[in-house]
Structures are given as structure tokens and as C-alpha cells.
Image (tube, grey):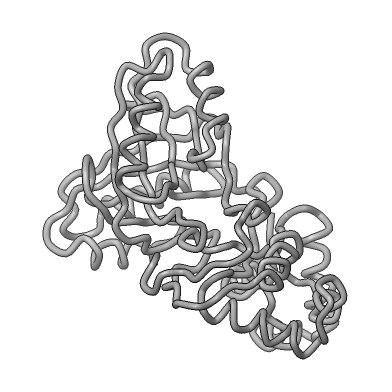
Amino acid sequence: MLDAVDAALVRALQGDGRATYQALADGVGLSRTAVRARVRHLIGAGAIRIVGVLHAGVMGMEVFGHISFRISGPVRPVMEALTRREAVTFAALTAGRFPAVAHVRVGGDAALAAELTVLRGLPGVAGAEVFRAGAIVKDAYSSVRALREVSIDPLDWRLIRHLQRDGRASYAELARNVGLSQAAARSRVVRLIDAGVVHVTALIEPSAVGANEHLGFGLRCRGDAEAIATRLAALPGVSFVTTGFGRYDIVGSATATDRPTLVEALEAVRGCPDISYVESWEHLSVVKERHQVDAAGARETGTPREGDT
């Protein structure tokens, strides 16, 4: 379990994983030395990993879909098949109306339709319903930011790959690894971060921080779904919110340290004005969870499209 100071440090590192120890210290009211020790302990204990998360749009994976499965027979064989699908970034056995859910990331609606064709054809799958995300409003594993047009050359890709392994690597270390001066490495990293190409953030290991209760929810609402989603994103325990089209108007998830706290989070969601329907499902077993888009196999040139999200 994290104390209040550690929790505040994790939140700050989720926003900016490369924040200086002095900036972190100023935020929590401790000395730089004390904050440095706390951050190193969090990393050493496996409670967090600080990594660079590549914007999905850079890799042509702009479209996000939430899939709810109807399954005939045992669920495990279906889940094993889902883990082998490259487009599937998250898959879980669930308690609720659907026995399994998955998230997919693909390059466009045609690719989403093709992936759905494959998923619906898996042995044991009796049907699959899709929610196609329009705008991701909150993601606890990455700040939600627009991607600006920027050219990425081979040296940039090498820097990105190093940041994916260690988001707090010093500029001196990055410079040595890619053969640049420290000033040049810093300039490139700042440019990539400012353009939204890569976001350095703290990924939390739920079991290490006691956040062992998870649920997902799908909502239908009246009026402006994005405004409602923005209000939901500010609620304690809500870790992911996206608006979109299909079975629901909004899909999200919540995480808590215990069942009563998780119930409180769901009750807060239910109490949000203009929500007309709430469906929830508990994540009994997460079999795949991939927050990072891998740059290892990326082509070493490219220009992201302005406005990709």
C-alpha cells in the first residue's frame, strides 16, 4: 500500500515521468533527497515502472475498440486465442452479462471490421458486440494528448526505444546510447515529448500497490457524452474513460484497493447526472494487458498525421 506522499509522487510521475526530483519535492513538500529515495524505492520494489509510451497514432493504430463476447462452453480457450492476436491489447474473463471482454487497437475502421471477423470466428465465440471509441478522455497509463505533425528519423526511433525501456534515463545516458551530444539528445527528446509522440509515465503494478479490485462499465447517457465523460474522469477510482459509438455511449474502468471502495466508485458513476443506463462487469482474471505500443519493429522514418489521437 502507498502512503499519501508516495501516492502523490506516483500521480506526478504519471503526468511527467521525467520530472526532476526537485520539481517532485516541491510538489509534496519534502527534500529532494527524501523524494529521490522514495522514487527509487517505488521502482526497486516493482510498484511502478517509468517508461516511454509511444502514441498509438505514430504506429497507425488510431482506432480503439471494446469487444464484449458471448461464449459457448469454457472461456479459457477463447482467452488463450485472444492473447495471440497482435491487435488485442487487453483481454479479461469477466463476471457480468458477457463472460469476456477485450480491447483492440488497429489502424482504421476497415481493420477493425477485419479483426472482428477473425474474433467472431474463434472456436467457442457465439457472438461479439463492439464499442468503437471516438475520444479517449482519461487513461491512467498515459496522458490524453493530441499528436502534432513531426518528422521522426532513425535517431529519434533509437531514442524512443531507449525511453520505452527506461523513461528516466539521463540525457547523458541517452546521448551515449545513440551517439549524440547530450544537448542534441535533450533537444530531440523534448521535441518528441512536446509533439505527443512519446509520453513518459509511471505504469503501476496493481498488486504491488494493493489495487486488486477492477471493474469495467458501459454507459448510455443523455446530452453531451464527452462532457459527462469529463466529469466521470475526475471521480476517485476511475482509471479509464472513453466516448464512442455502438452498444454504449461511454466505456470506462475503475480500480480500487478493496471491494467496498470499488462499490463506492461505481456508485459515484451511477450518481452522475444524465446517465440513463449503467452496465458493469468485474474483471475476474486479466490474461493480457499491454499498455505500450512497441517501437522495436517500427520503420525508421515517418511523419505522424496532425490530429491523430
Q: Position of residue 42 (x, y in %)?
A: 77, 61
Residue toward you, 155 or 170: 155
Residue toward you, 40 or 58: 58
The correct choice, above or below, for 277 with respect to 35 in the image is above
How many labels were placed on the picture?
Answer: 0
**On-image quarter of the N terminus:** bottom right
Left or right for 138, reference 53 = left
Q: Position of residue 43 (x, y in %)?
A: 78, 61
**Residue at horizontal 39%, vertical 74%?**
306
**Residue at horizontal 36%, vertical 48%?**
266
Direction top: furthest residue? 73
Where residue 54 sits, quadrant-wise, is bottom right
Residue toward you, 174 or 20: 174
Q: Is residue 3 visible?
A: no
Direction left: furthest residue? 223
Left or right for 46, reference 291 = right
Residue toward you, 21 or 151: 151
Q: Position of residue 245 (x, y in %)?
A: 22, 49
Where residue 218 sits, quadrant-wise, is top left
Q: Position of residue 246 (x, y in %)?
A: 21, 43
Q: Is residue 195 visible?
A: yes
Where residue 215 sits, quadrant-wise, is top left
**Residue at horizontal 19%, vertical 44%?**
277
**Residue at horizontal 30%, vertical 47%?**
109
**On-image quarter of the C terminus:** bottom left
